[in-house]
Image (cartoon, grey):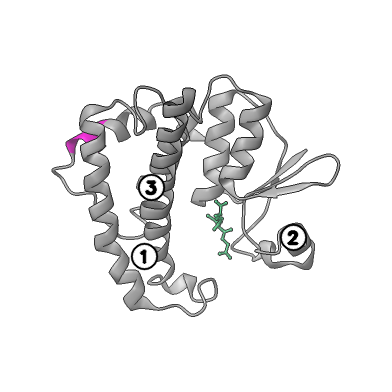
C-alpha cells in the first residue's frame, strides 16, 4: 500500500492527520504539485481527476477522495472511531463533515484558487470575481461553526472526529486565501487552539 501525498495542500493533510489520530503508518509517495507531477500520464492513470491524495493498495486498487480513503482506514482500524458511533452519532459526524467540506473547505479553496496569480494554470478558467464572492461565504460558515462549538467541545459533539479534521485544514488554509477569522468567534478560536495542539495537527 502507498499513499500519494501532496505536501501542505489541505486534502492530503486531511489524510495524514486522520492516520496520525489512528496511529497508522503508511508509506508516502511525495508528489510535487508545484512541478505539476499530478498531471503526468503516470499519475493520471491512477486518478483521472489529477487530484491528491490517492491511495494505491497492494492489488493495484486506487482509492481517491479524502473521505473515501478515510473510510477505508476506519473499516480496517475502527479505534478510535473518527466517523462517530451509533446511528445518531454517525449521522452527526457525516452532517458536520459535509458541512465543513462543502461550505468551508471548498469555499476557502475557491477563494484562493480563483484569486491567486500562482493558481492561473490550476483553476481554468480562473474567475477572480468568484474567488472574491467566496470570502463572505467562508465567514458566514465560520459563524455557524462558532455557534455549534459554543455547546460542543468538538464540531460533531463530545468526540474528536473527521469533521474536526476537515474544519482544521480549512481554518489553517484561511491565511493563504486571505480570509480573516472574525475576532468575535471565540468558540471557534478555543476549538482551533485545542485541535492545533493535538500531535496529529503537525502531520
Ligand atoms: N474532493 C477531493 C479534492 C482533492 C483536491 O482537490 N486535492 C487538491 C490538493 S488540496 C489537488 O490535488 N489539486 C490539484 C489541482 O487542482 O490540479 C478530496 O477530498 O480528496
- Residue farthest to the right, as pictured: 59
Q: Is residue 20 above or below residue 113?
A: above
Give the residue drawn at x 47%, y 71%. 118
Residue that carries the numbered disc 1 in the rendered image: 111
- Is 166 one of the magenta-colored residues? no
Q: Residues within 10 Å of mark 2 (few under 14, many from 20)?
A: some
Label 2 to label 1, Cα distance in Å? 26 Å
The kind of secondary structure the magenta stretch mainly shows is helix
Mark toward the start of the polypeptide (1 vs 3):
3
- Residue at disc 1, secondary structure: helix
Whether residue 11 sits left or right of residue 131 in the image: it is right
Circle 2: element type: helix
Is any part of residue 26 visible from this angle? yes
Quarter occupied by the N terminus: top right
Mark 3 Cβ inside 8 Å of ligand 1 = no
Please, is residue 118 above or below residue 99 in the view?
below
Q: Is residue 188 magenta?
A: yes
Residue at the disc numbered 2: 43
Mark 3 secondary-structure assignment:
helix
First in sequence: mark 2 vs mark 1: 2
Quarter holding ligand 1: bottom right
Residue 45 position in % (x across, y down): 78, 62
Magenta residues, start to end: 186-190
Residue 99, label in figure? 3
Percent position of residue 68, x then y: 61, 44
Residue 15, relative to residue 134: is it above or below?
A: above
* Foreground tag (3 vs 2): 3
Q: Is residue 82 left or right of residue 43?
A: left
Q: Which residue sits at x=52%, y=42%?
A: 14
Whole-percent x and y of residue 101? 43, 50
Amino acid at each position: 500500500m502507498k499513499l500519494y501525498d501532496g505536501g501542505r495542500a489541505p486534502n492530503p493533510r486531511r489524510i495524514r492527520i486522520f492516520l496520525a489520530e489512528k496511529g497508522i503508518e503508511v508509506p508516502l509517495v511525495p508528489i510535487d504539485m508545484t512541478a505539476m507531477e499530478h498531471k503526468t500520464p503516470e499519475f493520471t492513470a491512477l486518478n483521472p481527476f489529477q487530484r491528491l491524495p490517492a491511495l494505491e493498495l497492494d492489488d493495484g486498487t486506487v482509492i481517491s477522495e479524502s473521505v473515501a480513503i478515510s473510510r477505508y482506514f476506519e473499516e480496517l482500524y475502527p479505534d478510535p472511531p473518527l466517523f462517530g458511533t451509533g446511528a445518531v452519532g454517525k449521522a452527526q459526524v457525516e452532517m458536520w463533515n459535509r458541512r465543513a467540506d462543502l461550505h468551508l473547505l471548498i469555499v476557502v479553496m475557491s477563494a484562493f484558487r480563483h484569486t491567486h496569480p500562482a493558481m492561473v494554470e490550476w483553476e481554468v478558467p480562473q474567475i477572480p470575481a468568484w474567488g472574491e464572492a467566496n470570502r463572505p461565504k467562508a465567514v458566514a460558515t465560520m459563524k455557524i461553526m462558532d455557534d455549534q462549538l459554543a455547546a460542543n467541545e468538538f464540531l460533531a459533539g463530545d468526540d474528536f472526529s473527521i469533521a474536526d479534521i476537515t474544519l482544521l485544514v480549512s481554518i489553517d488554509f484561511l491565511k493563504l486565501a486571505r480570509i480573516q477569522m472574525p475576532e468575535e468567534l471565540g468558540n471557534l478560536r478555543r476549538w482551533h487552539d485545542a485541535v492545533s495542539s493535538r500531535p496529529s495537527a503537525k502531520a
